[in-house]
Amino acid sequence: MPNRRSFLRTVAGGITLATTGLMGRARADLPQGALDSAMRDSLPGKQPLIKRAFRPPNYESPVEVFDEVITPNDRFFVRWHLSNIPRVEAGSWRLGVGGDGAERGFELTLEALKRDFEPVELVAVCQCAGNRRGLSDPHVPGVQWGYGAMGNARWKGARLKDILARADLKKEAVEIAFNGSDRGPLDATPAFAKSIPAWKALDENTMVAYEMNGAPLPHWNGFPARIVVPGWTATYWMKQVTSIRALSQPLAGFWMNTAYRIPKDKFPVIDRFTSQESDTTTPVTEILVNSLITNITDGGRFPSGQPMSVKGIAWDGGYGIGDVEVSIDDGRSWQGAVLGENYGRYSFRTWEYRFAPQLAGRMTLMARASNVRGTLQPSELIFNAPGYHNNVVQRIAIDIV
Amino acid sequence: MLIGPCIAISAHGGEVPVKLASGEQAALVQSRCSVCHSLDYIVMNSRFLSRTAWEGEVRKMMKVMGAPVPENEVAPIVDYLTQNYGVK
C-alpha cells in the first residue's frame, strides 16, 4: 500500500494480521474498534501518520518509520490530552521559573533561554507510557496505541539544572513541576501538569529543549519549548512548557495522584518517584528495555535457501543496550544479533540478524533485548489495568516458501 | 493492512466526523461526548468493555474531566455504549 505524501486518507488496518489458529493460538492485535477507526491522516506539517483520535490529536508513526534510527520531525508521533492547543507565538512566549522551593523567581523569553544557558544536545527516545496499550491482552481502556507512540530525536536545549541554579533551589525543594499551554474546552477540566523529583530535574541530561533534529520543535511536538527527561516516559516531557516551579510539597491532582501510575513492585524499575508513592502504586518513571522488528511484518513471505535479514531497534531507560537476540524457532533457541552504531544510551540502537531459512513452512520470529544491567524483556506480558510498560517479546509470523 | 477502497480527499488533516452506531440515545451520546473529544475515543475502545467498565469511563468524564452530564442521563448513555460498543 503506497504512502502518499499529500492528503490521501486510507483506512489503515491492523499492525499485525488478526488471525487465530496461527501457531495454535490467537495473535495479539488491536481491538476491532481501533482497527475500524484508524486511518492514515496528515496533521499540518506532518506526513501521513496513523490516526488513533482526531481531537485531541493522538497519531502514531507506522513501523516502517523506525527503519531509520533518527525519527524525522514530520513523521514523529503526536499525543495530546486536551483539545485546545494554542499556536504559540515565539516572541510573546514566556517561561516562568520559581515556586516556593526556590529563592528566586524570574521569566525567560525564548531568546534568553537560548542565549543565557549553555546549549546541550543529546539523542533520546521519547516514548508514551501507554505505547502498545492496544496490544494488551486482555484489552484495557485508553488510547489504543500500536507500536508507534514513540520517536528518537536529537534534542537541543538548556540544562534544566542550569535554569534551576539561577532560581537557587532551597534545600526543602522535593519536586519540580511543569505546566503547559493546552486546555480542555471546559473550565472544569484539570489542566495537564506534571512534576519530577528534584534529583531527576538536576540530572545533567534533563533539559528544556527548543530544537528537535536541528530544527525548531514542530507545533504538534511542543513548540517553542518542551521538557525532555531522557530515559523517562514522555508523560513528563511537558510540551509548550510555560512554567517551572520548585515545590516544597509533592504536586497533587489527577495527573499525578491517579493517572500514570503502576502497581508498586510489579516492574523491574530502578528509578523510583518516592515522594509520589502510595501504599499500592507508584508513578511510571523509566522506559523499560524493549525492541521492535522494523523490516518485517506478520504474513511476510520469504524464499527458502536465500539469505534474509531481520532488522530492528532496541532501547531502554538509559542504562544502555547490552544484547539483542533473535529466535527463528518460536523461542526454543536464540542467536545474537549484530548491534549497529551507538548514538548514546538514551537512543534507539539498531540491530540486524542475517540467516538463510531452509525449510518451507511457517516460522515465528522473535527479538529479545537486554540492557547492560542484564534486565531482559519478559516473555509474558506484565499485565496492568492502565496498559503501561508493554515490553513483552515481539513475535512475528512469516512463511518460508 | 488495507480495508476497503482508498479515498483521496484534497483537504488538510482535520477532524472527519465520527459516525456512531445508530440507536436510541445515539444523539444524546454524540452531543454530550463530543464537547471535549472526537467520538473515535468511543469506537477505538470497542468491543471489550463491560457495562461496569463503560459506566466507570462515563463517571470519570464527569467527576475528573468536568463533563456536565446530569445524573439522569448516565444510565441511558451507559446503556447505549454497552449495547453498541460493549463486550459482546
Image (cartoon, rainbow, N blue to C red):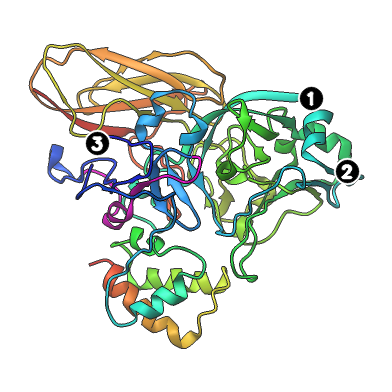
The part of the image, by quadrant, that contains residue B63 is bottom right
Q: Is residue A265 visible?
A: yes
Name the residue furthest right: A103
User: Was residue A40 drawn as part of the magenta stretch in this picture?
Assistant: yes
Question: Which of pointers 3 and 2 lies earlier in the amino acid sequence?
Answer: 3
Q: How far, Cα to Cα, is label 1 from label 2?
A: 23 Å
Residue depth check, mark 3 versus mark 1: number of the one nearer the observer: 3
Q: To which residue does mark 2 refer?
A: A170
Range shown magenta: A27-45
Quadrant housing the C terminus of chain A: top left
Residue at image position (38%, 40%) is A6
Q: To which residue does mark 3 refer?
A: A1
Q: Amino acid at mark 1?
A: Glu
Comparing A194 with A276, the one in front is A194
**Parent chain of label 3:** A
Above or below, A358 relative to A194: above
Comparing A124 with A176, the one in front is A124
Above or below, B62 relative to B7: below
Q: Amino acid at mark 3?
A: Met
Q: To which residue does mark 1 refer?
A: A118
Q: Residue A146's x, y, as percent?
A: 37, 43
Assess disc 3: are there few (<14), some (14-19) or many (≥20) residues with their C-alpha within 10 Å of its C-alpha.
Answer: few
Asked whether disc 3 touches disc 1, contact meaning CB atoms under 8 Å apart, the reply is no
**Parent chain of label 2:** A
Quadrant housing the N terminus of chain A: top left
